[in-house]
Amino acid sequence: MNVTATHPYVAALLAGSAALPKSPAAWLDSRRAAALERANALSVPTTRDEEWRFTDLTPLTKLQVQPVAAAIKVSAADIATHVVPEAAMRLVFVDGVPAPELAQQGALSAGVTVIAMSDALKSHAALVEPHLAKLAGVGQELFTALNTAFLQHGVFIHLSKDAQLKAPIHLLFVAAGNGVAAYPRCLIVAESGAEACVIEDYVALGDEAYLTNAVTEIAVAPNASLRHIKLQRESQKAFHISNCAVTLAKDARFQSHAVTLGARLSRNNLNISQQGEGINVEIDGLALIGGRQTADTHTLVDHAKAHGICRQTHKTIVGGAGHAVFNGKVFVREGAQLTDSSQQSRNLLLSDKARVDTKPQLEIFADDVKCAHGAAVGQLDAEHLFYLKSRGLPEAQARNLLTYAFGAEIIDHIPVPSLVAALEKLVMARTEASL
Amino acid sequence: MSSVLDTLVSQPYKHGFVTDIESETAPKGLNEGIIRMISAKKNEPDWLLEFRLQAYRHWLTMTEPQWPNVNYPKIDFQAISYYAAPKPKKKLSMDEVDPELLKTFEKLGVPMHERAALAGVAVDVIFDSVSVTTTYKEKLAEVGIIFCSITEAVHNHPELVRKYMGSVVPTADNYYAALNSAVFTDGSFCFIPKGVKCPMELSTYFRINTQDSGQFERTLIIAEEGAKVSYLEGCTAPKFDTNQLHAAVVELVALDDADIKYSTVQNWYAGDENGVGGIYNFVTKRGLCKGRNSKISWTQVETGSAITWKYPSCVLLGDNSIGEFYSVALTNHKQQADTGTKMIHIGKNTKSTIISKGISAGYSNNSYRGLVKIGAKAEGARNFSQCDSMLIGAKCGANTFPYIEVQNPTAKVEHEATTSKIGEDQLFYFQSRGIGTEEAVSMIINGFCKDVFQQLPMEFAVEATKLLGLKLEGSVG
C-alpha cells in the first residue's frame, strides 16, 4: 500500500493511510489496498465533472485534514442535547473513533446485533465479508475510495430473519477536533422479514474545520423493511461528504429521511438499487442553509426489476448566499415494467444572493411505466403572505411561519417525536434568525 | 470506421440527381486551402474569409462533444468534400419519380403542384414557379424586406451580414458551429426592417423553392424594432440526401418589440429499419432577444435523421422579452434524438415556456435535454417547462435531462415531466367504437402533441399530423 497519487490534495489526504493498523481480516486488507490504488489514480473532482458541475470543492482542498489516533475526551454532558430518548441503543463516535464510554446499551430484540465495526470484523466476519466495500462501488468516486482505504471504524448492524426492532438505533457521530478527517463506515444488513429504524446523526461540539467522509452500505433482503434517518448538523466550517448505497431485494421496503442543516459544504449521495420486484421506496430530503453554505444532494434510484414503486420529495430552503444543488436520477431498465416512480424537487429562495441548481433526470427503457418528476424554484407566495398579514400577523412572523411550514412537511414524516421536536425548534430558530 | 463513413458519404444518388464530380466538387478533406477556395469560388470579401479562417483555426483546437446521449461511429472530417457547386440536376419527368415517394406525398396531402418540386423534378419544366417567386419577391421588396440567400446578402448587404453574423452563435461556440462557420456554403438571409410586419408566412415562398442548400447551411434572420416575421424551414415530405453529416447554424436577432417565429419540420432520411445510413443532424440554433419586449418562438417537429442533436435556444437579454420552445420529437427504428432547448434569462421580467413531447418507438432512443438559467439580474423571471414522453414498445428509451439554475430569488421556475404509453385499454376503447388500431394510435399521438401542433402554421399542422401517423405505421399492434 503506497501512496502514489499525483493529485497533491489526494496525496495529502492519503498520507495518513500508512499509519493505519493492519485490519483483523486479510480480505479487508486487500479491499483497502484496492481502494487506495483507486484513490491514487483519481483526482479531486472539479466543476468540469458532470457529477460535480455545481459544487466547487476548491475550499476543501485548502483544508489539511488527517484522521486522529485518539480523539479528544468528550463527556456525557457535552452530548446531552443530542440524546434521543426513544432510541433502543446508542453508539457514539468522536472524530470517527468509537467512544464506548458514551454509548448506551439498551435491550435489543432477539436477532438484532449492533456493534462497532472493529469488533464485527473479528466476531461477525462471515456476515460482514459479503457486503462490506461491495455494495458501495468505488468507480469514479474519490471519496468512497478514500473511506474504504481508511476503513477501520464504524458500525455493523445485523437483523436476522424476521427480527424486528420498533425503537430506533441511534448512531451519533460527534466532531470535536480541528483539522480532523473522519471516515465512518456503517454496514446495515437486514435479513428477510426483518424491520428496523436507524438514525445516523452527525453533530459538532464547536466551530471547527474538519472533513467527515462517511459511507453507509445497506442491504435489505426480501420482505424486510428499513428506515434510515440521516441528520447532518456539522459545524459551519466543516465539510461533509457522504455516500449511502442501498441494495434492495424482492418486496423490500426502504424509507429515507435526510435533513441537512450544517457544514460549509455538504454532499449527500444516495444510491438505491432495486434488484427485485415489488420494491417500495420513499425518500424525503430537506436542506435548510444560509450564510455561505453549499448543500448538494444527489440521488439515484435504479429500477432494475418490475413493479417497483418510488416516491421522492426533496426540498431546500436557501437564504444568505447559500447554494443548494439537487440531482435526482431515476433509471427504469428494460423489463422493469409497471414501475411507478415520482420525484419532486421544491426549492425556496429567501435572499438575493441565494442560488439553486436542480437537475432531475429520467432515463426510461421500458414502456409500461408511470414516471413523473417536477421541479420548482420560487419564493414565498405573495398571496399566502397577504393572507397571514390580513389575519394580523406581522410580515416577519408570516414569512417565518410559511418558511417553517415548507420545511415541516418533510420533518413531520420522521416517526421519532423527540427528533421532530428538536428539528422543528432548530428550523424555527434558523428562520427567525432569517438565516 | 472511416471506411463505413466513406461508403455512406459516397453513396450514389438514389433519386436521380446527378453531379458532375470532377469539375464542381472540391477534393475531400479540410485545410486552409479548401476554405480559401470556397471563399474565392463565392467571390467573398476579405472579412468573411477572415471569419472562416478564424473559425477553422479555433475548430482545430476543439474536440467533438461526448456528452450527448447518442452513439455513432467517429466522423472522419477529412473524408468529406466541403464544396460542391449547385448541382446540375437531370430533368426528370413526373413518371420517372420513385412511386414510393409519390405515395408518401399522396398520404401527406401535399398539393399537386408542389409534389413535383419536392420530388426533384425540375420545377421550371412543369410549373411557372418563376412567376410565383417573382410575385412574392416583389411583394416582400415593396415593404422593404430582404429575403435572399446568404451569398447574395454578402454581396448586396455586407454591412448587415457583417454586423449580425456570429453575433448570436460565435464562431468558437461549439465544435459543429465552428466547423460550420469555417465551411458554410449557403443558406438564407432575412431582414425585416423597423415596424414591418411580414405580409406572409415565409414558408410559402420557401417551400416552392426547395433549394438544395447543402450540408453546412447558415441562416440569419434579423427583425428590427417592432418587426414581425414567421419563418418555416424544411417540409413534411421526406427529404432524401446523400450527405451524411449536416451541421447547420441558425441565428435569430430580435430588437425592441420584434417578434420572430421560427418553425421547423425535419424529415431527413432516417436510415433503414436496422439503422443503416441516415443523416446526422447536428445543428446549432439560437435566438437573441436583444431588445425590450422582443419575442422569439421556436417550434419544431423532428421526425427524420438517424441522429438529431439540436437545442434551439433563446437568450433573453432585453427586459420583458419572451422565449418559447415547442417541440415534437419522434424516433422510430434505430433513430437517436438528443434535443431540447436552452432558455437563458438575463433581462428583467423575462418569460419562457418550454413544451416538449418526445415519442419513441422501435429500438430508438429519445432524450430531452434542456437548460433554464436565471441570471442574478433577471428580476421577476418566469419559466414553465413541460416535457412529456411517450413510449411505444418495450425496446425503446426515453430520457429527460433538465438543468435548472436559479440565481435570483424573485424567479419562478416550474418543471414537469411525465412518461406514458399507449395503453391496451385505450386501443380497445377506440376499437369498440369502430376505429382501427392504426387510426387510434394516430389520434392518441395527435392528442399528445396538440399543444405543439397548434403553434404550427395551419397547413403544416395538418401535414405534421399525418406525418407522425405515417412514421409510426406498423409499430403498434
Image (spheres, rainbow, N blue to C red):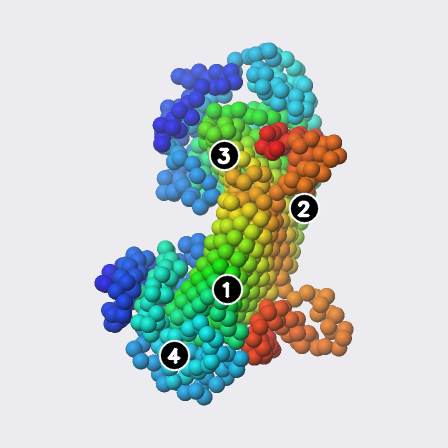
Residue A279 against residue A405 in the figure, above or below? above
In 3D space, how far apart are the residues under numbered discs 1 and 3 (Cα atoms)?
44 Å
In 3D space, how far apart are the residues under numbered discs 2 and 1 (Cα atoms)?
66 Å
How far across and how far down the image is residue A34, in percent?
A: 28, 59
Which label is found at residue B334? Answer: 3
Q: Chain of mark 3?
A: B
Do discs 2 and 4 belong to a common subunit?
no
In 3D space, how far apart are the residues under numbered discs 1 and 4 (Cα atoms)?
33 Å
Check contact, mark 1 vs mark 3: CB within 8 A. Answer: no
Badge nearest the viewer, 2 or 3: 3
In 3D space, how far apart are the residues under numbered discs 2 and 3 (Cα atoms)?
43 Å
Residue A92 against residue B103 in the figure, above or below? below
Query: Regarding mark 4 in the picture, which secondary structure is present there?
Result: strand
Q: Amino acid at mark 3?
A: Lys
Nearest the viewer among A380 and A231 is A231
Q: Amino acid at mark 4?
A: Val
How far across and how far down the image is residue A343, in percent?
A: 58, 57
Q: Amino acid at mark 2?
A: Asp
Which label is found at residue A94? Answer: 4
Q: How many marks?
A: 4
**Mark 3: few/some/many CA within 10 Å (<14, 14-19, 20+):** many
Q: Chain of mark 2?
A: B
Q: From this viewpoint, is residue A321 visible?
A: no
In 3D space, how far apart are the residues under numbered discs 2 and 4 (Cα atoms)?
64 Å
Which label is found at residue B257? Answer: 2
How far across and how far down the image is residue A159, in percent?
A: 45, 69
Nearest the viewer among B43 and B415 is B415
Q: Which residue is mark 1?
A: A193
Task: Tell me what residue is drawn at x 36 percent, y 78 percent.
Answer: A98
Q: Chain of mark 4?
A: A
